Structures are given as structure tokens and as C-alpha cells.
Image (cartoon, helix red, strand yellow):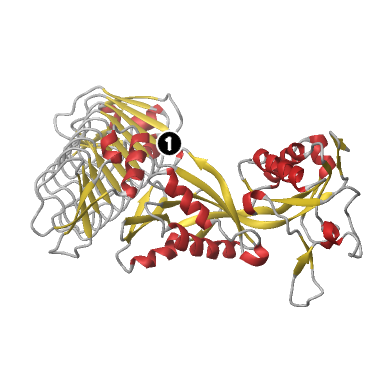
Amino acid sequence: MFIHSTEIVDTFAEAFQMWGTRVIITAENRKWASAAARSMTGFATSVIGCRCEAGIESEIPAEETPDGRPGVSVLLFGGSADGVGKRLVERIGQCVMTCPTTACFNGLDAEKTVAVGGKLRYFGDGYQIAKQLAGRRLWRVPVMEGEFMVDEAFGVQPAVGGGNFLVLGRDLAVTLEAVEAAVEAMRVPGVILPFPDGVVRSGSKPGSKYKALPASTNDAYCPTLRGVAPQTLLPEGVNCVLEIVIDGLDEASVRESMRLGIRAAAREGIVRITAGNYGGNLGQYQIGLHELLRGGA
Amino acid sequence: MKLRLHTQPAVPLEAEVIAPEQLLGKTEAEAAALPVYHGKERVALGEFFSVTAQGPSDTLEVEGDLARVKLLGHAMSRGRLLIHGDVGAHLGACMSGGEIVVDGNAGDWVGREMSGGRIVIRGNAGHMVGSAVRGAATGILGGEIIVHGNAGNEVGHGMRRGLIAIGGDSGEFTGVNLKAGTVIVLGRLGMRPGAGMKRGTIVSGQDAELLPTFRYDCLFRPTFLRCYLLYLRRLGLAIEERLLSGDYRRWSGDGMELNRGEILLYSG
């Protein structure tokens, strides 16, 4: 299959079941809401090294947030519901509570919840105040600037992590241009791209010659190893590969985001678009690229 | 189902049976035969009300000047009770769920000892809104009472949880002996608000004279209050923009008690 001159390989992205949550951060103005969200989603590119994956889903207009102030929606994913809870306590405690004027609300209605404000409240050293409004319990934690308000519990639900595709380009310039266009097109509700501005250059394969490492560089896609690695998956004329990884609250959102991204990335100078998988042996989800592009999401 | 008052009671009528779960699902004849107390005399509901089986299955409507009819919605746990006209004392007493809406004024003891549900009074309310009964230490345990107009004395007396919002002014001793929960008065607080309060929050949209056992903390912009005010606005209470974006003076008290309560007075 071709889109323009770009070959779409008949393969699939192998994605995994994760647990996800949505956090709404509000503040006195957009600057501080964004500052907290950026801080909270920093160092959250891959569960392998960061214990969670997180990113900014969207900005939220003041009229749509619980306290009527400008907001930012953050999605965070982890390997288990408990793990998500722990990461939320760490990251909201260190990155949101510390940020001037912020408040933090649960943004996901789900059957399962994890305690967040219910743990962070102890920072109040006995001066914290609980409030119940419309069925939700909020904690007011006194801080030097005033108060930090946070929901007692946050919803968590099964989610999909590790959707991906690789963009194989003629050179760095055209490949960067293609992935930047893809990332712009992929902003779908319920989806984040956890790597820096959505793009990863250091794709990995499982295992390593060094026993302590669970993953190592994906040599089959490294242009500098074309003549050295035991196997190369680079067609002639490809000198740069960039990958986009997608996490979503459900499979449909991940599929839609991938579909939009692949269509946006395909162009003159992009030789091939393919996807990473482990032969279907590890992940619970297989997202076929041809199926995706033929039938919509 | 719809009830219409056809005979004005000479003395207060105690009508605990006028609640959705007591009447809905019954025939007109069955409903009209239910007992009410006219003074100390037990009579049939039909002697004062005409009963018509119509309208949504979860809604009970009552029409007429019910200022002498007490205990409507008593112990109600579900459904809707719509009252067109003034209503007497003890509306929604001991209520645990559902919603009561009054297009008119309400007497004393609205929602006393309630634990859940919502009561909306589009006019004024009497004394003891959301209060404990005399001799009891604890008032309401939850739920919401929203009065669009003014309310009398001792709003939220002994309240432990829940939300009471008064669109106008409140009388003396608002939030007296408050244990927790939130009382918001958009207008002026009467004398001695929060006397004896342990925890909880009293808010006023105007300045107020406080007891000397309250200590000033700071001027700040409470985020939680924005959530409350926006919630009340969504429920139809008129909230001025200044209250959402303004600063409030925070006072802690009552120093005679636990001193963990707060009074927030709008400051501009």
C-alpha cells in the first residue's frame, strides 16, 4: 500500500494493556496551569525507565473546569492501577502541589479509583480540611501561598500503551518535517504521545548483549549500523528513522490517532512507514497498518 | 401524582404522608385515604386535598397555600416533590434522598436532621434551616439546602456535613455550634455567626461583625469556594461574578471551642 510515494508496510503495531488516568490541573492563569502540567509530565516517556508514561492531552477553557479557571488535562499511564496511584501521589505532590495557585481534579469517571488527595492531605499536618461537594470529596491543604485543593480519589481504567509507527525518511530534514506534521494531526481526545514533543529517535529492541539491560538500541533501524548489524530493516535511500509512540485511554482512540498520524506523515521523501512489534507474542493488541488505513479507526 | 389543597386547615395539618415514596404507585382512592393529623385529630388526606394520578412516575406535585401544612417530604429518600405555593414547618425533615423544590416560601425547620438529598426554596425560609432539634447536639448529616431568598435564625445549627446556601440574608446565630459542613450566605449574616463552631465553613458575600473569639488569619482567594459557587450557579442560584473572583477575609474560630472552623467574608 502506498500513500503518495510512501510505502505503508503490511505489518502491525503491538500494543499493551496498561492502566490510565486523567488529571485536570487548574491555576490562576494558563501560564501556571501549563507549568504544573509540564512539570508533572516530565521524565515520563517510558515505563521502562520512568515507571509511568504521561503527557498533556489538551488545554481546557476556564468555563469547562471544576473551579472555573484555566486548565490543562494530563493523561498518565502505568502497568497497574496501584502503580498509577503511586505515580499520581508522587507527581501531583511534587509537581502540582508545589506550583503556585494550582488545584488538581480527577478527570476520569471510572469504577476503580486510587487515593491521591487522601494521601497528600497529610502534608497539611492536621490543618487540612475535607469538603464534600456533589458526591466528590476534596481536600484543602494549607500552603504558604494559600491552599492547594485536590480530589480525594482519581479514576483509573484499563488503557492501551505502546501504539507506534516508524517513519523511515530520506534525510533528517524531511523526516523531522513528517513527524512534526504527524504529531500535530494526532491530537485526539484520550491520547498522549509520551516522548519529547511526541517523537522518539532511540527506538529499542528487547534485551541486550549486556545482561543487566532489559532493552537496547534497535540496531535493525539504525542507519549507521546498516553495514554492521546482523540484520537491517532499512531500504535503500533511508538515512533517518523516527518513531511515534501512542498511549490512549482506549484502543479506538489509539487507532484513530495512529491513522491520522500516518496519513499526515506520508509524503515525498518518506520512503516507508512501518510499525514495531514482537511477532504478536507480547502485546494484547495488534493494530494492523493496512486495516487501519483502509477501514478508518 | 398531583395534590391540590381544597380546604384550608383551621389548625396546622401534619401530613407526613405527602412524600413521593408514600404516595407514588398508589391509586387516587388509596392516596386520599392515607391519614394526616389535623391538630390532634386523625383524618383522611382527601378531606383537605384532591388527588389526581397524573405526571411523571417519580414526581409528586402539591398545589395551594400550604403554610399550615407541616412535615411535607418527611423522611423522603427518593423521587421529586414539587410544591407550588408556600409551605409550613419541618419541610423535608429527616430526608435522606430525592429532591424537594418549593415555588414559594417555607416555614421553620426546613430540612432539620436531614442526611441526604436536596431542598430548594425559591422564596424565603423561616428559622432553623438545616438544624438540629432542641436538645440534640447534631444537626444535618448531609444533603443540600438552597434558599433563594432570606432565612431566619440558627441556619445550620449543629450541622455535621452538607451544604446550606442562602441567596439573601440570614438571621442571628448562623452556623451556631457547627461541627463541619458549609454554610454560604450570599447576603448579610445576622449577629453572632459561628458561635460555638468546632469545624466547618461559613461564608458571607458581605462583611460581618464577628464574636471576639474569632481570630483574623489572612486575605485570600479560596479555590474551593469557586467550586461551590459555580455548583450553586448551575443549580440556579444567582451568583454575582464578584463573589467568584474576589478575595475573602478568613477568620478562625470559635476560640471557645476547637478553633478549627472558619468564617470567610467577602472583601472585594
Residue at coordinates 19% horizontally, 63% vertically from top-left? B259
Q: Residue furthest top?
A: B6
Residue at coordinates 89% horizontally, 64% vertically from top-left? A229
Q: In terms of depth relative to the viewer, which is nearer, B28 or A175?
A: A175
Query: Label 1's element?
Result: helix
The residue where tag 1 is placed is A63
Regarding residue A248, the answer to whether it shows in the image is no
Where residue A243 appears, x then y in whole percent? 74, 51
Whether residue B21 is situated above or below residue A153 in the rendered picture: above
Where residue A104 appears, x then y in whole percent? 44, 52
Q: In terms of depth relative to the viewer, which is nearer, B101 or B261?
A: B261
Residue at coordinates 25% horizontally, 22% vertically from top-left? B6
Where residue B213 appears, x then y in whole percent? 10, 60
Callout 1 environment at 10 Å: few (<14), some (14 to 19), or many (20+)? few
Quarter-wise, where is residue A271 in the image?
A: top right
- Mark 1 — on which chain does it sit? A
Regarding residue B3, the answer to whether it shows in the image is yes
Q: Quadrant of the N terminus of chain A?
A: top right
Number of numbered tags placed on the structure image: 1
Whether residue B264 is situated above or below residue B150 in the rendered picture: below
Whether residue B237 is situated above or below residue A241 in the rendered picture: above
Q: In terms of depth relative to the viewer, which is nearer, A13 or B182?
A: A13
Left or right: A163 with respect to B192? Answer: right
Where residue B232 appears, x then y in whole percent? 33, 38
Q: Residue furthest bottom?
A: A211
Three-letter amino acid code at the position of disc 1: Glu
Residue at coordinates 74% horizontally, 77% vertically from top-left? A212
Q: In terms of depth relative to the viewer, which is nearer, B162 or B26?
A: B162
Q: Quadrant of the C terminus of chain A?
A: top right
